[in-house]
Amino acid sequence: MRRSLRWLLSLSLAVGAASTACKDPASKESGTQGAPTTSSPTSDGTGPVARVNGTDIGRDTFTRQMEKTRARFTQAKREIPPALEVRLKENIIRKLVDDELISQRAKAESIALTDAEIETKLTEHKARFGSPDAFKGFLERTGQSEEDLREELKRTELRDRLFNKVANVEEPTDAEVKEFFDKNLERYKDREQVQVLQVMWKSDKAEAPDVRKKAEQRAKAAAAELKKKGTDFKTKVATYADAAPSPNGGDLGWVQRGRQVKQIEDAIFDAKVKANDVLGPIETNFGFHVLKVVDKKAERQKPLEEVSAAIKTAIKARKRSEKTRDVLTSMKKDAKVEVLEPGVSLEAKPMAAPPGAIQMQGPPGMMGQPAPGGGQPITAGTPVPQPAQPIQVQPAAAPQH
């Protein structure tokens, strides 16, 4: 199972960001619709961190997320600069505000979840890990309890149901699918591929010349044997005890361009090479390789009929993402949001990149890009540990189209 996406880039922040000053409490308003405001915080730091349409957002979840973030930095032996700490707090509070807005809107839309439905979701989620021990390890790595995960699954399901209702989109038309296909032909090509078998004698170029020469001579002798008519490559390579291990007879499967070192690619993709040809030995930084080209596939443009279903899914996902962002932005615009954490504001504000900083690229809401609903771009300077992320739910990466 792939590793879970523990630390989303939407919270990846960098050293060198400009500091956010705390406003004078005397100059703050009590909060108006359309813009998050900062109200006077409780003096002992134990009260809510924000208030959404009169509903308090408690400090407990916020505190746990900040503690996880600080632990990540401590583990990496790094300090959190004051400006960065402000931005971390902003991201966590922004997420909590979004969750509360969604909860309130779901209630208004009469969308609710039963305990049985949540338990079913939790059971399904546990099954993805394959075993109770793997699931337990996931909880330990991400610093959460089963109850934390149950609550996050509930929030995720509530969000999905809400946006399925209020941000539903129509199926793409045939014309839209055709236009998308015509503009993205390169995405729908089967690249040239070669099916390859390999046996290799490892040899580092830093080794003594006589040691490397011995490996080369052994590879030459094996190549001569393997090129003999009627020789079964897979069976023969299993007898080469001095070679590097060759699982499944050295079968590398189908190889696309750009996946192997240049010396091997130049050999196996040579137009003169045909199926069943044995090549080598080929010298690389790893050693000496003897290869058999089992079969070859030329580059092929996939027809529209073959990929139309995937294109429809991609178009619909994009439309739904855009509509979801618009609905969430509208919800924020119409809400009364008060930020009660000292020195924190969710109002959009430009940030100058520090000298020499690198602008990171990514989807909306990730580093270097505006976050949906009014977040500000984040620049990156020197690398920092990934800060803690609100409870993780999905253990697998998103599929690629």
Image (spheres, rainbow, N blue to C red):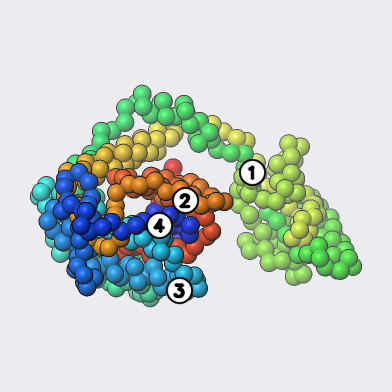
Q: CA distance from mark 2 to mark 3?
A: 22 Å
Q: CA distance from mark 4 to mark 1?
A: 47 Å
Label 4–label 3 contact, CB within 8 A: no
Q: CA distance from mark 2 to mark 4?
A: 13 Å
Label 2–label 3 contact, CB within 8 A: no
The residue lying furthest to the right in this view is 210
Mark on residue 379?
Answer: 2
In this view, the mark in front (2 or 4):
4
In this view, the mark in front (3 or 1):
3
Q: CA distance from mark 4 to mark 3?
A: 21 Å
Q: CA distance from mark 3 to mark 1?
A: 42 Å
Q: Is residue 1 visible?
A: no
Q: Which residue is mark 1?
A: 257
Quadrant where the N terminus sits is bottom left
Mark closer to the chain start, 2 or 1: 1
Q: Is residue 275 above or below residue 178?
A: below
Q: Where residue 205 sits: x, y (%)?
A: 81, 62
Q: Which residue is mark 3?
A: 74
Quadrant where the C terminus sits is top left
Mark closer to the chain start, 4 or 3: 4
Q: Secondary structure at mark 3?
A: helix
Label 4–label 1 contact, CB within 8 A: no
Q: Is residue 27 left or right of residue 231?
A: left
In this view, the mark in front (2 or 1):
2
Q: Amino acid at mark 2?
A: Thr
Q: Is residue 187 left or right of residue 39?
A: right
Few, some or many residues within 10 Å of mark 2 (<14, 14–19, 20+): many
Of the pair 154 and 18, the residue shown nearer to us: 18
Q: Is residue 362 left or right of residue 41?
A: right
Q: Is residue 92 left or right of residue 399?
A: left
Q: Where residue 238 sits: x, y (%)?
A: 70, 65
